Amino acid sequence: MRVIPGSHITEYQEHLKVLTAQYEDPDARPLGFSGPRVPSLALESNPGDVVFFSESLWHAAFGCHNRRIFTLIYYEEPKTLEQAEWLREYQTKTTAMFHPHESFLKSSRPRIRCMVEPYVELGLA
């Protein structure tokens, strides 16, 4: 896996948005070269390793098509209207976060439903 140092900073991300063309077309060359040639740092790991980083850090893996990924994202439950609005706004920018799977939403286990109910109440699920 590779990361772009400093890419978690919003102002820097604005300059990187051109790279999102590669989501739809892996062969796209928005900077004139392929994704693996984008200046970045390698996070070397072995199968079974756990890697922690901010989801807002631009990251990618190249050349590995049969991989497994399990992502957990934790946020404090919003206590103010501003925090709730921030979550709603952030949800519009991602398909990976704040979208609890239907099996969690319909779980017969109260503990599981309790974890996702705040998302439902905020209109995020």
Image (tube, helix red, strand yellow):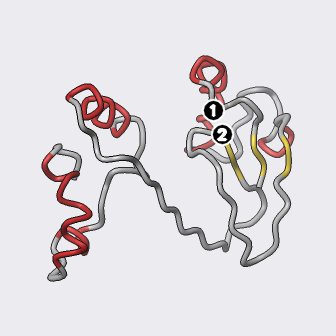
Direction bottom: furthest residue: 108
| Image quarter of the N terminus | bottom right
Q: Secondary structure at mark 2?
A: loop
Q: Secondary structure at mark 1?
A: loop
Residue 94 picture location, percent across and down: 42, 42
Mark 2 and mark 1 lie on one chain; the one further toward the N terminus is: 1
Judged left or right of residue 74, residue 113 is left
Q: In this rendering, is residue 24 above or below 115?
A: above
At horizontal 85% and vertical 34% (from top left) the residue drawn is: 39
Read off the residue under disc 1. 8
Q: Quadrant of residue 15?
A: top right
Residue 124 picture location, percent across and down: 23, 46
Mark 2 and 1 residues: CB-CB less than 8 Å, in contact?
yes
Q: In this rendering, is residue 39 above or below 59?
A: above
Q: In this rendering, is residue 73 above or below 123?
A: below
At horizontal 30% and vertical 61% (from top left) the residue drawn is: 100
Read off the residue under disc 2. 58
Looking at this view, is 107 or 19 the one in front? Answer: 107
Q: Quadrant of residue 14?
A: top right
Judged left or right of residue 5, residue 50 is left
Looking at this view, is 62 or 94 the one in front? Answer: 94
At horizontal 69% and vertical 68% (from top left) the residue drawn is: 50
Distance from Cα at disc 2 to Cα at disc 1: 7 Å
Judged left or right of residue 75, residue 63 is right
